[in-house]
């Protein structure tokens, strides 16, 4: 008997032909045809313990690799579970392909109380993703998938969602699987480049601010900064674009007053591939009071709060290459002065943070000692990770991952799993608080199943401490912020994970190094009293 190909199987084949190598999902009765396709596919499939973790893992995978993964999600309940992780990826510009089932075409919007039914599933998803589509005919599959991947390559990379009715998933697929189409990326407007060059030539004290949209343009950022003699500040997503060891690097220190003073004193800011989001600076406004040249692939960023005197809507690498063609060259004296100023600011920032947050800095020191320069630190919404965003030395792009834009607790563990799967040769450390870990703790089982050598540095202050401190500052009674925690050693044991307690920096370094050599995750518990 000849086997016919279902639309569900064709979906998997089409994703594979478009370069998808990894998928995440929990099998359900509504997505069986997708799993029929996976059984004959080169796409690796990982099963988390909750659909929210599907999206977090795909997010971590994308941030570490720069490539999208797929999520296979059931109708209704599965999709609402995944929604928080999808929204996080949208906020932080992580590409992923979310394939979900939906009720049969004859049941759409009919409210017949079918299993997992939502009144308007596509309407729920539309504001959470860059693009959402209901595939009503298998013959449209190649066009729809091409449009989805075009969103990644020609626009700000964010999740896309394709929902497929149950009857369509089961239909025989009769169309041809088209060759993947790559969307061309447009170059910068020559007139705008000329205007930007004119402003840059006139600037006496320029500064460069880079974000995640410039991660693939690290060489161009470094060369332009050196030619201009311009300090480089980054968003959290832009950490490592200019290595921490570079004399012009100020890192992701926008929250620090010293960095804001530097920006306020500059006469021009070149802002490349960043939203200038609140979570990157935690101030009412960054003092961008001089001229602004802004480069972004997303026109919403170009026309946002800060605007710009010259706006370049294009890929960051193409824009920076065009600017480099102008042949800038600052004087040796200017460069020496700027290097000295950056060094002084870095020293002042470091001293103030060590004084204010000594325990955080000891934990950061321990992780940095144990983690190779190409290793990845995945942080959660926890105070020590906020400090690490500014103070953890990053030497390569994509080595600090944090849920900055949406600020989701529980992100770090599943995102770290995704980062591990992106490249087995790059070690990964998760940094998470005692409150955040318990949002997604069940995925310790996933990490154990996969045999991942993942150190999970658990910062245990027995509280939602950031919220507690906010209550204290605002003279509000401390309600709901103190935690009665479980025995994390017993929990780790029950999931098949290792456990260590680090009381000193040396303990932490040793524990991380041991965990990275192992074949299972290790929970490493540290407290405020670390020595």
Image (tube, grey):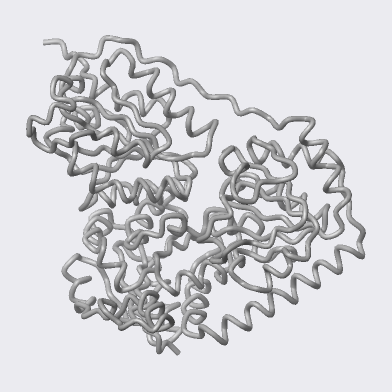
User: Is residue 188 left or right of 273 when viewed as pictured?
Assistant: right
In the image shown, does 249 or 309 lie closer to the viewer? 309
Residue 328 drawn above or below residue 204: above
| Residue 288, position as x, y percentages in the image | 70, 58
Q: What residue do we see at 61% from left, 67% from top?
A: 253
Residue 337 drawn above or below residue 52: below
In the image shown, does 360 or 177 lie closer to the viewer? 360
Q: Residue furthest front?
A: 475
| Residue 402, position as x, y percentages in the image | 45, 59
| Residue 60, position as x, y percentages in the image | 40, 51
Q: How many marks?
A: 0
Residue 348 drawn above or below residue 155: below
In the image shown, does 30 or 466 lie closer to the viewer? 466
User: Is residue 282 left or right of 230 when viewed as pictured?
Assistant: left
Q: What residue do we see at 22% from left, 78% from top?
A: 485
Quadrant for residue 486, please give it.
bottom left
């Amino acid at each position: 008997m000849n086997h016919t190909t279902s639309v569900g199987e064709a979906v998997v084949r089409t994703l594979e032909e478009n370069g998808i190598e990894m998928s995440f999902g929990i099998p359900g009765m509504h997505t069986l045809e997708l799993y029929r396709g996976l059984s004959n596919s080169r796409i690796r499939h990982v099963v988390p313990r909750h659909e929210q973790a599907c999206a977090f893992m795909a997010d971590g995978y994308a941030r570490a690799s720069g490539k999208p993964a797929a999520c296979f999600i059931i109708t209704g309940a599965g999709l609402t579970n995944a929604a928080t992780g999808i929204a996080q990826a949208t906020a932080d510009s992580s590409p992923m392909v979310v394939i979900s089932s939906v009720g049969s075409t004859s049941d759409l919007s009919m409210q017949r109380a079918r299993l997992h039914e939502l009144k308007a599933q596509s309407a729920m998803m539309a504001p959470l993703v860059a693009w959402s589509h209901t595939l009503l005919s298998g013959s449209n599959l190649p066009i729809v998938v091409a449009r989805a991947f075009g969103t990644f390559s020609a626009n700000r990379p964010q999740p896309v969602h394709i929902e497929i009715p149950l009857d369509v998933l089961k239909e025989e697929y009769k169309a041809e699987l088209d060759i993947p189409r790559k969307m061309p990326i447009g170059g910068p407007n020559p007139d705008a480049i000329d205007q930007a060059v004119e402003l840059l030539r006139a600037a006496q004290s320029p500064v460069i601010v880079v974000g995640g949209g410039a991660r693939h343009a690290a060489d161009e950022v470094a060369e332009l900064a050196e030619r201009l003699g311009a300090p480089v500040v980054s968003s959290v997503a832009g950490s490592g674009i200019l290595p921490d060891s570079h004399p012009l690097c100020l890192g992701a220190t926008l929250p620090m007053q010293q960095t804001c003073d530097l920006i306020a004193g500059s006469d021009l800011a070149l802002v490349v591939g960043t939203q200038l989001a609140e979570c990157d600076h935690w101030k009412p406004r960054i003092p961008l009071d001089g001229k602004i040249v802004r480069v972004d692939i997303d026109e919403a960023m170009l026309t946002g709060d800060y605007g710009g005197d010259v706006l370049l809507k294009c890929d960051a690498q193409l824009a920076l290459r065009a600017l480099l063609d102008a042949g800038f060259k600052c004087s040796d004296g200017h460069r020496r002065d700027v290097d000295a100023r950056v060094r002084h600011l870095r020293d002042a920032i470091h001293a103030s943070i060590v004084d204010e947050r000594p325990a955080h800095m000891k934990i950061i020191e321990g992780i940095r000692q144990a983690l190779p320069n190409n290793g990845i630190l995945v942080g959660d919404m926890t105070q020590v990770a906020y400090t690490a965003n500014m103070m953890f030395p990053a030497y390569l792009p994509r080595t600090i991952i944090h849920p900055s834009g949406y600020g989701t607790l529980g992100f770090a563990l599943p995102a770290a799993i995704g980062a591990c799967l992106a490249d087995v040769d790059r070690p990964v450390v998760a940094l998470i608080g005692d409150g955040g870990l318990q949002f997604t703790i069940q995925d310790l089982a996933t990490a154990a199943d996969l045999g991942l050598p993942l150190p999970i540095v658990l910062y245990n202050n027995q509280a939602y401490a950031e919220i507690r401190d906010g209550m204290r500052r605002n003279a509000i009674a401390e309600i709901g912020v103190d935690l009665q925690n479980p025995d994390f050693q017993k929990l780790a044991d029950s999931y098949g994970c290792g456990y260590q307690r680090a009381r000193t920096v040396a303990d932490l370094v040793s524990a991380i190094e041991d965990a990275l050599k192992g074949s299972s995750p290790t929970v490493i518990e540290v407290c405020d009293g670390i020595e």
